């Protein structure tokens, strides 16, 4: 490649391409393209999820800054304080909506863990998933796997070796649990299937990735 990327980083792709430098380069570009194609659906899932959970916890506790009264662990409260500190650094008003926007995807997923089963999930958080009627832990496992994938994408890590078709299906399944109408609308604009289908052509040089 042009020298802009480190050898250890490129070696991941070189190994996947069995030493073929040209194929590894094409795989690198395709990894960027497929990550970009997943960004939009992840954006919608994360925003819809945090708004839904925030809405239900606000209703349950009767206040928008529900974290002040909810039985949260010290680690969870620390993350809230970090979000509030970021609001101050951004010179925002620090309203509950501002804080919610600063809290990570992982923060919202953590509210589905076992420690919050009786205090958050049963009375409030489950209502943020009107399309779901299964076990909390099953939903958490699926959601957390998406958190990990989202983090790999946002940190520009390789995702090409994953079963991305299954990840994509899971993403829309959970988005549908939160808001079925939104899931259908986002899917209508989704270019991921096209990008996934073009992988072979990209690696063979018959097709160029589009960022």
Image (cartoon, grey):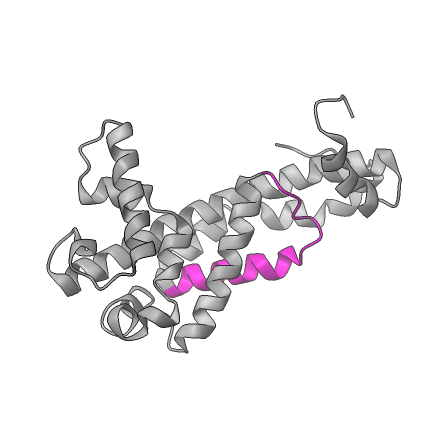
Q: Main secondary structure of the magenta part?
A: helix
Q: Residue furthest left?
A: 62
171 falls in the magenta region: yes
15 falls in the magenta region: no
Q: Tell me where residue 205 sits by quadrant.
A: top right
The residue lying at 39 percent from left, 67 percent from top is: 113
Q: Is residue 202 visible?
A: no
Placement of the C terminus among the 4 image quadrants: top right
Residue 33 drawn above or below residue 62? above
The residue lying at 50 percent from left, 58 percent from top is: 171
- Residue extent of the magenta highlight: 156-177
Q: Is residue 49 left or right of residue 4?
A: left
Q: Tell me where residue 166 sits by quadrant.
A: bottom right
The residue lying at 65 percent from left, 33 percent from top is: 210
Q: Is residue 142 left or right of residue 121?
A: right
Q: Residue furthest front?
A: 74
The residue lying at 75 percent from left, 36 percent from top is: 8
Q: Is residue 58 left or right of residue 53?
A: left
Q: Is residue 204 visible?
A: yes
Q: Position of residue 23 (x, y in %)?
A: 83, 38
Placement of the N terminus among the 4 image quadrants: top right
Q: Position of residue 80 (x, y in %)?
A: 28, 48
Q: Position of residue 168 (x, y in %)?
A: 56, 56
Camera-nearest residue between 157 and 205: 157
Q: Is residue 202 left or right of residue 98?
A: right
């Amino acid at each position: 490649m042009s020298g802009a990327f480190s050898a250890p980083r490129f070696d991941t792709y070189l190994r996947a391409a069995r030493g073929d430098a040209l194929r590894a380069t094409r795989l690198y570009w395709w990894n960027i393209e497929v990550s970009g194609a997943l960004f939009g659906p992840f954006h919608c899932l994360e925003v819809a999820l945090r708004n839904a959970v925030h809405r239900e916890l606000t209703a349950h506790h009767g206040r928008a800054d529900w974290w002040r009264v909810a039985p949260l662990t010290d680690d969870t409260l620390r993350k809230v304080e970090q979000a509030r500190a970021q609001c101050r650094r951004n010179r925002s008003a620090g309203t509950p909506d501002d804080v919610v926007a600063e809290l990570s995807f992982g923060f919202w997923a953590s509210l589905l863990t076992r420690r919050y089963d009786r205090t958050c999930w049963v009375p409030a958080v489950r209502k943020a998933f009107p399309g779901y009627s299964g076990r909390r832990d099953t939903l958490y496992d699926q959601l957390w796997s998406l958190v990990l994938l989202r983090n790999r994408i946002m940190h520009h890590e390789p995702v090409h070796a994953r079963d991305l078709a299954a990840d994509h299906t899971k993403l829309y399944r959970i988005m549908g649990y939160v808001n079925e109408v939104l899931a259908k609308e986002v899917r209508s604009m989704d270019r991921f299937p096209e990008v996934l289908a073009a992988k072979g052509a990209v690696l063979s040089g018959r097709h160029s990735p589009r960022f």
